[in-house]
Image (spheres, rainbow, N blue to C red):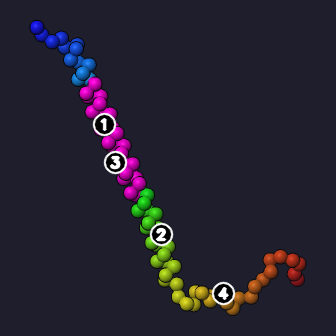
Amino acid sequence: MSVEPESVQPAEETAALEKSEWTTLRVITWFSAGMAVAALGIYIGSELRCRAKFKRRTPYDFYSHAGEQQTSEFGMGI
């Protein structure tokens, strides 16, 4: 007795569909992981850059506005 091709075909289609879904899910997962790593790298890089810029300040930077006269922005002046 021979097996009909119609009874085998849905099992093959189901296996191919499951493999396709698995591949798609795997691609989406790797892409998401890559985007997370890239975002984390950009954030860490910007934090390190801000800290490096802050550490490069000299003692004169702390007193750079010490001699300036404060002008009032409020009230009526001449």
In this rendered view, identify the residue nearer to me: 18 or 68. Answer: 18
Q: Residues within 10 Å of mark 2 (few under 14, many from 20)?
A: few
- Tell me the distance, in whole angstroms, between the alpha carbons under discs 2 and 1: 38 Å
77 w.r.t. 39: above or below: below
- Residue at the spot of label 1: 22
Residue type pointed to by label 3: Trp
Give the left or right position of residue 63, taking residue 78 as reference: left
Q: Specify start and end residues of the magenta stretch as a single range.
A: 14-38
Residue type pointed to by label 4: His
Q: Quadrant of residue 24?
A: top left
Question: Of helix, strand and loop, which mostly describes the magenta segment?
Answer: helix
Q: Which mark is residue 30?
A: 3
- Residue at the spot of label 2: 47
- Residue at the spot of label 4: 65
Q: Residue at x 23, y 23 (%)?
A: 12
**Which of labels 3 and 4 is toward the front?**
3
Q: Earlier in the sequence, mark 2 or mark 4?
A: 2
- Tell me the distance, in whole angstroms, between the alpha carbons under discs 3 and 4: 52 Å
**Which of labels 1 and 4 is toward the front?**
1
Cβ atoms under marks 2 and 4 closer than 8 Å: no
Q: Which mark is residue 55?
A: none
